[in-house]
């Protein structure tokens, strides 16, 4: 969360500011254990945004969660890319 300034990155995409309190694995850790601790695969989110990315009962990605995964290229530090 420190990498994202404790700000929800999903809310930020929509022009809102929310405090992040959860770290979401863009590529699910159970399916992609090799990416579990890669910074580029971790995104800070609020509880509300986390619920929009992942079905909290099944653990499956929602349509928004799959979209975020498709937008994220493995190994590419999207945080650096945005700062340029």
Image: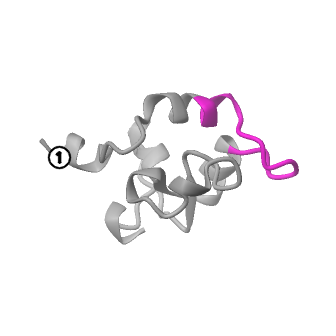
Give the main secondary structure of the magenta stretch. Answer: loop
Which quarter of the figure has residue 36? bottom right
Q: Residue furthest front?
A: 34
Assess disc 1: are there few (<14), some (14-19) or many (≥20) residues with their C-alpha within 10 Å of its C-alpha. few
Choose between 27 and 9: the one closer to the eye: 27
The residue carrying mark 1 is 83
Residue 41 on image: x %, y %: 47, 51
Task: Classify 28 as above or below 5.
Answer: above
Q: Residue at x 40, y 45 (%)?
A: 12
Which image quarter holds the C terminus?
top left
Q: Position of residue 77 (x, y in %)?
A: 30, 47
Q: Is residue 29 left or right of residue 6?
A: right
Question: Residue placed at 57% from the left, 45% from the top?
Answer: 27
Q: Position of residue 9 (x, y in %)?
A: 43, 49
* Residue 62, image x, y percentages: 71, 35
Which residues are the magenta region? 54-66
Secondary structure at badge 1 equals helix
Residue at the right extreme?
57
Q: Nearer the viewer, residue 16 or 68?
A: 68
Indicate whether residue 65 is drawn in magenta: yes
Question: Is 61 a magenta residue?
Answer: yes
Please say if 84 is above or below 43: above
What residue is rendered at 53% in x and 35% in y? 69
Using the image, determine if residue 47 lies above or below residue 53: below
Please give left or right for residue 33 compared with residue 18 in the image: right
């Amino acid at each position: 969360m420190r990498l994202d300034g404790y700000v929800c990155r999903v809310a930020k995409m929509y022009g809102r500011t929310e405090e992040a309190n959860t770290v979401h694995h863009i590529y699910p850790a159970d399916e992609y254990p090799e990416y579990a601790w890669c910074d580029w695969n971790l995104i800070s989110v609020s509880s509300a945004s986390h619920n929009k990315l992942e079905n909290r009962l099944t653990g499956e990605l929602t349509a928004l969660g799959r979209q975020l995964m498709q937008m994220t290229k493995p190994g590419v530090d999207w945080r650096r890319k945005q700062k340029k």
